[in-house]
Amino acid sequence: MENLIHMIGAKFNYIAYIILMMIGLYALIAKNNLVKKIIGMSIFQTSIILFYVSTAYKTGKAIPIVEHGHGAHSVIHATDYINPLPHVLMLTAIVVSVATLGVALALAIKVYRQYGTLEEDDINSQIRIQAGK
Amino acid sequence: MKITGLVTVIICGALLIFYAMDFPDFGDGTSPASTYLSPYFIEHTIEDANVPNIVTTVLADYRGYDTMYETTVVFTAGLACFFLLRRKESQNPPARFYRHTPTGITLRIEEGGKLPAEGSKVFMRIDSLWAPDSLIIKNTCRLVIAFIQLFALYVVAHGHHSPGGGFQGGVLLGSSIILFAISNDLRRSIKRFNEKTSAILGALGVLLYAGTGFLCLLLGAHFLNYKALAPIFRSTAAMARSHGILCVEIGVAFAVMAVMIWIYYNLSSAGKHDEGL
Amino acid sequence: MSLPIDMIILSLVVVSGIAAISVKDLLGAAIVFSAYSFLMCLSWAVMGAVDVAFTEATVGAGVSTVFCVAAVFHTTRRTKD
């Protein structure tokens, strides 16, 4: 039992990222409304970013900005700083995610203009009626 | 569909959590993710580029190609929104609303009616869904916008030493214009920063980034190797890389700012550029 | 071990994520999603990723909410689920 509590404490971030990812996936599969699906997609994206940022963390170490950068050139130890590489990968991913959000919402507006609804089953039935005639 | 989705999600989640238990512990400094490549970045950032913020160095120098194409992706998204939504205004506009400024009376002019002159000081056009005219909101936003833009410029220029850089500064600059468009109205914002400007600035930002790379290529080094710019900046190789990073960040800030504004214009007016939020 | 404040913030993130996809009003969903982004940004700041947190604060909690509200304004607020 103690072992289990220790394990959950050590892996809490990974469990949280999986739960968030599953919330996003559930919204993408089961929700009927297009804007809800888009919000689910964004939750999925942020959960992946949470995973990357969690892998970068080192307990009790400094943020990735070198102290006394231009002062006395003491030796810099890599173990004193949090890993900066996942941060860089995710920083660009966030900006790209807002750009894709814009395109997705533009598509939703376009669909609404065509069919007058955002509900997926209504759109499907309208397409079926148009194909039938 | 709901039950299928729930079952899929629960099975997937259980499997992922089961395998996540094999990950290295949270906060483990010796995990594989932080032992191979990143120590090099941390230890060499000062001697290579003279930039204390390691994230900025890796973003614009060591992984410069990646960031260049991310900027291109952002610009392409702006273009995609434009092509999806933009449409010309119809010849016969529907009913419009005007406010008679001295008395505060709102007028509704039917389709085909005689409209006031475009630059009229007495009649001010207002959005059909949002009538209240708030002096407090307009003047507070007018005051705040200047400080937001100043802070954005600081974030772009000081990204070498503190958190920040081209992406954050660009988004802040864009959001200041978006705040103007929300607090006043979309037409006045478009008069100051129109669609053409945003398209040109977005392309210019990407061009500035790629142009810095090509300049390095012309000076005999690899693409985006800012060391070659040392004769232009009259400095050491490390300082040249620092200045090269600043050039690139300015390009990113231009592109991101213009694209954010462009997407907002198209989304908020559904492509008509007539009445916004 | 995870930090206690990290655990608290992440639990709030999960709650607001569930709320964002289950609210029956799209404008409300956009605002709850903004709160979700801001809590996420806090959790990244706690984990030392200052640049990522700054980007998320400007982009996720700021601009993407405006985009969502703009899209909802031009479509419809009502939803069946």
Image: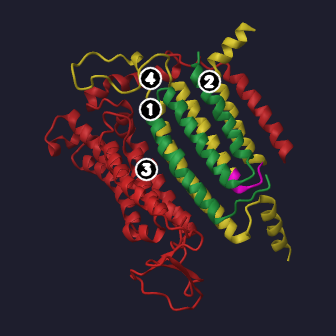
Q: Quadrant of residue B193?
A: bottom left
Label 1 – label 2 distance at C-alpha = 18 Å
**Image position of B53 (left or right of B97):** left
Please give the label number shown on residue A116.
Answer: none
Where's residue A16, x and y in %? Answer: 66, 29
Q: Is residue B139 left or right of residue A106?
A: left
* SS at circle 4: loop
Residue C50's label in the rendered image is 1
Q: Pick the quarter of the image with the C terminus of chain B.
A: bottom right
The residue lying at 39 percent from left, 33 percent from top is: B55
Image x and y of residue B246, in percent = 29, 43
Q: Tag 1's secondary structure? A: helix
Residue A73: x, y in percent? 23, 19
Colour used to depict chain A in the structure image: yellow
User: Cβ–Cβ below 8 Å for labels 3 and 4?
Assistant: no
Label 4 marks a residue whose chain is A
User: For mark 4, what is the residue?
Assistant: A82
